[in-house]
Amino acid sequence: MRIISFCADGIREAAKAGFYDWVLDQDADFICVQNLQAQEYDLHDDIFFPQGYNPYFFDAVEPNSNGVAIYCRDMPKAIMTGLGFMDFDMEGRYIQADFQNISIGCLLAPSAYQQDAKAQHHKKHFFELFQAHLSKIRNKRREFVICGNWNMAHRDKDVENAAQSLNQSGFLPEEQQWMDQLFSNMGYVDAFREVNDDNDEFTWWPDGDRNSGDGWRVDYQVVSSGLQPVIEYGAIYKNQVFSSHAPVIMDFDFEM
């Protein structure tokens, strides 16, 4: 099972940059895309609805903002849009495809600037609710993959200039602690780090310049612990630039 996750910064712009030309050659079972910045009904070109996939979109209420999509090779049993977090669901932040024994989620977490107290509170509240949700679903008799832009980095090795970034939103001590709890107390696994422990693996460059020395790894595929033994391969694709984020590719030895 191959899952590709990508934060597009605008799906129409990413398409023009060649994202679909690349991703359709990757033989993925799931393609999860975040930050579409477009409504589904505005995407008229066939490129956004490729043959061989069942596409599902969850738009934000505000036009041309946020939005997530998941492309499934197999037809899911059910699609869940949103997390039941009222205001956040209106922002188009989460979609999930449910199958017999696994659920694939696509997440766009809120971001915030350090000086914006309101945005910081908004982001903190989302992750408080999301933590409770993750604790609840941990007891379900199925596996989970929740991939996307979490807008947080976990360790020093996940930020190219960690010392300078320590007090920036996305790498605050309380955000690192939240990730610690996710990967220790809550029993979830950072799939990429199971197979790649290198210090120079980043997925996002705030100014879009991959030579800026300011890379962050904020795009994750977080999996339930039952999937840990079947993680086979992980990579961040950097040969082409489709947005300020790079796609994350994960392979699992898992039968649907």
Image (cartoon, helix red, strand yellow):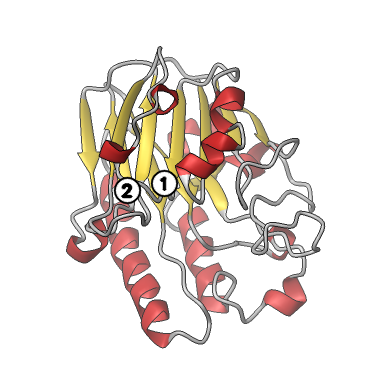
**Which residue occupies the foreground of this view, 58 or 198?**
58
Disc 1 secondary structure class: loop
Q: Where, by quadrant of the figure, is residue 207 drawn?
A: bottom right
Answer whether residue 130 is visible to the viewer in this image. yes
- For residue 216, above or below residue 1: below
Residue 241 falls left or right of residue 148 = right
Between 132 and 94, the one nearer to me in the picture: 94
* Residue ID for mark 1: 36
- Closer to the eye: label 1 or 2: 1
Asked where in the image residue 66 lies, by quadrant, the reply is bottom left
- Relative depth, front residue between 176 and 228: 176
Q: Residue 222: in sight, yes or no?
A: no
Residue drawn at the location 70% of the way across and 63% of the way down: 159
* 49, above or below 161, in the image: above
Task: Kindly identify the residue that appears in the image at 20 percent across and 28 percent down.
Answer: 78
Between 159 and 187, the one lying in front of the other is 159
Residue 94, label in figure:
2
Q: Give the mark, 1 or 2, whose residue is nearer the N terminus.
A: 1
At 78% from the left edge and 47% from the top edge, which residue is drawn? 198
Q: Position of residue 194 (x, y in %)?
A: 64, 40
User: Neighbour class for label 2 at 10 Å: few (<14), some, many (≥20)?
Assistant: many
Q: Quadrant of the C terminus?
A: top left
Callout 2, which amino acid? Tyr
Where in the figure is residue 172, as x and y percent of width and height? 57, 76
The CA distance from mark 1 to mark 2 is: 12 Å
The type of residue carrying mark 1 is Leu
Q: Which mark is residue 232?
A: none
Does 217 appear above or below 143? below
Q: Specify whether 200 is left or right of 17.
A: right
Tag 1: Cα neighbours inside 10 Å, few (<14), some, or many (≥20)? many
Question: Looking at the picture, how far across and down is residue 196, in whole percent?
Answer: 72, 40
**Secondary structure type for disc 2:** strand
